[in-house]
């Protein structure tokens, strides 16, 4: 039998590993692949999260309202959703390694366009271009995870990939803010453009071809492919779960920085601490939650983490004048648990689709995810107002919406089944 490394280089699917047809992938090779994918996801997350701490500056620099800032977030997610939707019809026709190279190249160009923006309107257009590549990037990354990593280790692998969020918070955001302070807000986007090119080199060097999905028969008619995926009730539950999960997060996340500055008394200069401490703790807890999901069950752990996450959601959206240490405690708990519930959810979602549909499914999933995030930030922006004293109002209402959405997610996760569970019926 060929060596595991050779199997992995050939793009052997995780289903063959799970069934015992081939041995488990060598940990060293597996971690090498995960490290590259974390890098890919890192630039995507850093680009998105960079907008959050810059919110007070953008609102002041361009004299825009919370609604207009919400549109900066939404245009990215809507673009990601639309492009991810159409990418779903072709993504399973290519080696996933080549797909990563293409989207990283486009993402580098988009970051450069952001840096060259001269006003609010051109920045809005550049964010749409960035979203077009960012949304597809995330879909390809999670497709590779599902193709290569066996199901019983997929929770841990998902936690590792999602550690890109705390890494972006601990390293990316402070670095971006430091560069912005040295020069201006354009410097972080130039940095991102260069970093994306370096990631492409790492992908070409360390990521093996991932083409096992090409061996399966594929539906060439896009309408038929759409029907196959969306006529499956279990797939619809998975899409509903990710939509409500994003809705529960992105009604709150884009406005936290502006809220703690205007309402909780935090200085703009202290915002890097918010992302540093929250991200640092999340870096360790994300992998822990991934391991616990593999050990005790993804569905069960999601229910536990999601339920607990309601507490910091309500706390962070009801803050008034608060000492800095307490603000950091609340926001760190928010980041740990809101990120943490995403780990078992994504691991559960990847098990709900057959391998030959996975790339298309994950692209549709990313599209639903991004559109839900965009709608959430638009809704929150419409609800949130600014008082005569400059404080944000109605953020507590947004928190209640996020809490209810989280409860809906728990019930959807209970109904979602894996391919194996559906087959066993």
Image (tube, rainbow, N blue to C red):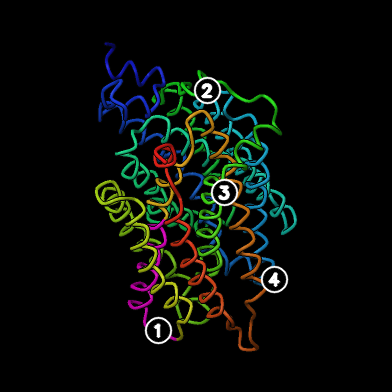
Work out which quarter of the rendered image holds the N terminus and state it.
top left
Give the mark toward the camera: 3 or 2.
3
Give the mark toward the camera: 4 or 3.
3
Residue 413 covered by magenta stretch:
no
**Disc marking residue 78:** none
Pointer 2 residue:
95
Residues tagged 1 and 2 counted as in contact (Cβ below 8 A):
no
Dot 3: few (<14), some (14–19), or many (≥20) neighbours within 10 Å? some
Pointer 3 residue:
236
Farthest residue in the bottom direction?
388
> Can you tell which quarter of the image residue 217 is in?
top right
Query: Label 1, label 2: how many angstroms apart (C-alpha)?
Result: 51 Å
Pointer 4 residue:
63
Q: What's drawn in magenta, residue-wise?
A: 321-341
Name the residue located 62 percent from the left edge and 77 percent from the top edge.
384
Residues tagged 3 and 2 counted as in contact (Cβ below 8 A):
no
Dot 4: few (<14), some (14–19), or many (≥20) neighbours within 10 Å? few
């Amino acid at each position: 039998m060929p060596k595991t490394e050779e199997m992995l280089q050939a793009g052997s699917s995780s289903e063959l590993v799970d069934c015992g047809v081939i041995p488990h992938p060598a940990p060293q090779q597996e971690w090498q692949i995960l490290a590259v994918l974390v890098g890919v996801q890192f630039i995507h997350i850093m680009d998105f999260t960079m907008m959050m701490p810059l919110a007070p500056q953008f609102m002041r620099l361009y004299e825009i309202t919370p609604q207009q800032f919400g549109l900066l977030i939404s245009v990215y997610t809507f673009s990601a959703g639309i492009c991810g939707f159409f990418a779903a019809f072709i993504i399973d026709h290519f080696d996933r390694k080549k797909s990563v190279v293409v989207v990283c190249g486009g993402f580098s160009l988009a970051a450069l366009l952001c840096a060259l923006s001269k006003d609010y309107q051109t920045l809005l257009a550049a964010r749409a271009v960035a979203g077009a590549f960012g949304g597809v990037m995330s879909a390809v990354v999670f497709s590779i995870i599902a193709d290569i990593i066996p199901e019983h280790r997929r929770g841990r692998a998902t936690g590792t990939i999602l550690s890109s969020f705390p890494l972006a918070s601990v390293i990316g955001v402070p670095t971006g803010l430091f560069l912005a302070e040295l020069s201006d807000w354009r410097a972080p986007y130039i940095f991102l453009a260069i970093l994306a090119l370096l990631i492409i080199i790492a992908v070409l060097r360390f990521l093996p071809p991932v083409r096992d999905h090409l061996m399966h028969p594929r539906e060439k008619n896009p309408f038929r492919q759409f029907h196959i995926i969306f006529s499956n009730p279990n797939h619809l539950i998975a899409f509903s779960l990710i939509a409500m999960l994003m809705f529960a997060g992105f009604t709150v996340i884009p406005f936290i920085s502006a809220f703690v500055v205007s309402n909780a008394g935090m200085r703009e200069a202290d915002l890097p601490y918010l992302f540093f401490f929250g991200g640092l703790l999340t870096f360790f807890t994300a992998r822990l939650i991934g391991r616990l999901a593999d050990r005790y069950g993804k569905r069960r752990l999601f229910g536990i983490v999601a339920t607990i996450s309601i507490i910091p959601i309500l706390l962070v959206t009801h803050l008034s004048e608060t000492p800095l240490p307490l603000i950091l405690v609340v926001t760190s708990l928010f980041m740990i648990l809101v990120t943490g519930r995403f780990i078992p959810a994504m691991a559960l979602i990847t098990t709900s689709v057959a391998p030959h549909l996975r790339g298309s499914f994950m692209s549709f999933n990313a599209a639903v995810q991004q559109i839900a995030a965009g709608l959430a930030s638009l809704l929150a922006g419409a609800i949130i107002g600014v008082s005569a004293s400059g404080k944000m109002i109605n953020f507590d209402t947004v928190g209640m919406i996020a809490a209810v959405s989280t409860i809906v997610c728990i019930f959807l996760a209970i109904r979602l089944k894996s391919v194996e569970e559906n087959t066993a019926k």
